[in-house]
Amino acid sequence: MRFGLREIVFFLVLLAVPAASFWFVFRPRNAEIQQAREEIREKQALLDELRDATSQTADLERANREIAQAIEVIEDKLPSHNEVEVILQDVWNVAKQCNLEPISVHTSDPKPIALAMELPLEMKIIGDFDGFYRFLLLVEQMPRITKMPQLEMKRTSQVNGFMEAKFTLSICFEPTSTAGVTP
């Protein structure tokens, strides 16, 4: 078989067709396919983020409900300003029940704390230590929010086994502010 000009041209055309089809058809199509895959990856990532965000929404709603319930419980433990005297009377009665003798009670000006107010009561009590310990346990069990930031105790010289306690009992209460309320 002899190779002439016609056969060489035919052979070059046969080689040019796959090269041209690769260059003009397959290469642009591969670029489009790669771009489409990249878009799919991006959209899949966005869908994953959206799925995570929507799963957290239910958790946030549940957490908000729990926080609202906790706030409600705390607000139930806060008496109004008018009920502070009742709490003071309850503390006085608990001291008497524990065989303690309240000597003095002095109130200070209420101080704001967070969304409530705090009324410090400086009290002085005399009695035996066991009674004072029972008093502390009963005050701790009271349904209202009270705290004792200061406590000084000393032994009395008048009666053996007796002690004198000077402490500050802080009672938290809701302020009776009507600011912002329209009739």
Image (cartoon, grey):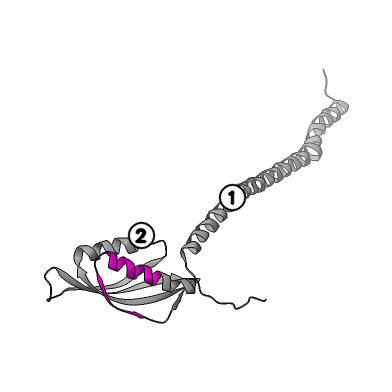
The residue most toward the right is: 6
**x and y percentages locating residue 20 in the rendered image:** 81, 37
Q: Name the residue under label 1.
A: 56
Q: Is mark 1 on a helix, strand or loop?
A: helix
**x and y percentages locating residue 123 in the rendered image:** 30, 76
Residue at point 64% right, 75% down?
A: 181
Q: Is mark 2 on a helix, strand or loop?
A: loop
- Residue 37 lies left or right of residue 60; in this view the side is right
**x and y percentages locating residue 158 in the rendered image:** 12, 76
User: How many residues crowd around disc 1 within 10 Å: few (fewer than 14), some, or many (20 or more)?
Assistant: few
Q: Is residue 161 above or below residue 57?
A: below
Residue at point 41% right, 65% down?
A: 145
Q: Is residue 90 located in the magenta-colored stretch of the structure? A: yes
The amino acid on which the numbered mark 1 sits, given as a three-letter code, is: Gln
- Residue 58 lies left or right of residue 175; in this view the side is right
The amino acid on which the numbered mark 2 sits, given as a three-letter code, is: Gln
Q: Nearer the viewer, mark 1 or mark 2?
A: 2
Residue at point 83% right, 20% down?
A: 2
Q: Give whichever of discs 1 and 2 has the lower sequence position.
A: 1
Badge number at residue 141? 2
Question: What residue span does the magenta drawing correspond to?
Answer: 87-107
Closer to the camera in the image, 117 or 32? 117
Residue 18, picture quadrant:
top right
Residue at point 52% right, 60% down?
A: 72
- Residue 24 lies left or right of residue 46; in this view the side is right
Report, in whole angstroms, how far the alpha carbon at label 1 lies from the one at label 2.
38 Å
Q: Is residue 59 located in the magenta-colored stretch of the structure? A: no
**x and y percentages locating residue 7 in the rendered image:** 85, 25
- Residue 142 lies left or right of residue 43; in this view the side is left
